[in-house]
Amino acid sequence: MAISRAQLAKELEPGLNALFGMEYGRYEGQHAEIFDTEGSDRAFEEEVMLSGFGAAPVKNEGAGISFDDANEAYTARYTHETVAMGFSITEEAVEDNLYDRLASRYTRALARSMAHTKQVKAASVLNNAFTAGATAGGDGVALCDASHPLTSGGTFANEPSTAADLNETSLEDALINIAGFVDERGLVIALRGVKLIIPRQLQFIAERLLVSNLRVGTADNDVNAIKSMGMLPEGYVVNDYLTDTDAFFIKTDAPTRLQHFERMPPATNLDPDLEPGNSGSRLVSVIRSASQTRVAYSVRPARNEGESSSPTGGRDCGPHFFKVLCSCP
């Protein structure tokens, strides 16, 4: 239904001092701090999780060589989702408005709505990081889980056994655990945390933990080991779309990371469309502006570690994240 003069009654009368409510700023590109972006020209993208070899055994003199098998662990699919919204305005509303160019104003508002949805969908991967079911990864468990199954048997954890708030101890424990991550066959992989991702409620705690030269909250003259050892070299980033106020995530330097495929970037089209009017034989011009984009947010593999995707599909996380929170969702 078109926006008509009935919805813009005050803008048809002289004497208004200002129009407000749609000129706010917006948080731009926060998804880029979490995801690597790739283009796509298919209806969906698939990736296969591979399992290599286990630890090499000792061969006794004269004995034969032991052979091991490599295999595919599972396949993950990214399915693109189309996000679209539009609006239309009657010609009379455009002509009789005394204060603004309606089409340009609402086109900016439409762009803001599209940008908001993009960030919400990206953040949903972390907001659902503890939920299996529809948001589970290729290994059948959530992105953050204490029991990711390994193809060699056993399990792997990328969350602590006991939940904890963000503080010096919990952050150091997380970094220690990251250094002990293993692959599908149980081999230790060289990995370290590079970036702390937090909701806005934790930004002051993160600043003190990562920037202070000395230890926080103690009278001892000890150095801040996290800073002096060069841990988390990319510092911390705030994501304003995270919904868990005490959750924090650590992104690692694994070669394959959280993934965002962009099938079609956001595009806006402005089209005139003539429709019969309501007053006699007059024709009313209806301007329709529509914006849409096709994306798939998900996670990519590097080990059997659970995944979560925003629109649909996806794959397992790989040892990219370690998350600690105060209370389990």
Image (cartoon, rainbow, N blue to C red):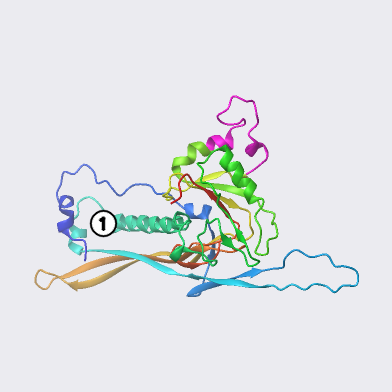
Residue 132 in the image, given as x and y percentages of width and height: 46, 62
Most distant residue in the right direction:
61
Name the residue rendered at 53%, 37% in the picture. 207
Indicate the amino acid at tag 1.
Leu
The quarter of the picture where the N terminus appears is bottom left
Judge from the rendering whether residue 1 lies leftward or rightward of residue 297; answer left or right: left
In the rendered image of this protein, does residue 189 appear above or below residue 281? above
Judge from the rendering whether residue 253 lies leftward or rightward of residue 162; answer left or right: right
Location of residue 58 (image quadrant): bottom right
Name the residue rendered at 9%, 71% in the picture. 280
Q: Kindly tell me whether residue 265 is visible in this rendering.
A: no
Please identify the dominant SS of the magenta region: loop
User: Along the line of sight, which residue is nearer the eye, 159 or 135?
Assistant: 159
Magenta residues, as a range?
207-231
User: Along the line of sight, which residue is nearer the eye, 325 or 295?
Assistant: 325
Residue 115 in the image, given as x and y percentages of width and height: 40, 56
Most distant residue in the left direction:
280
In the rendered image of this protein, does residue 5 appear above or below residue 47? above
Location of residue 230 (image quadrant): top right
Name the element at disc 1: helix
Judge from the rendering whether residue 3 lies leftward or rightward of residue 64; answer left or right: left
Q: Is residue 210 magenta?
A: yes
Location of residue 257 (image quadrant): bottom right
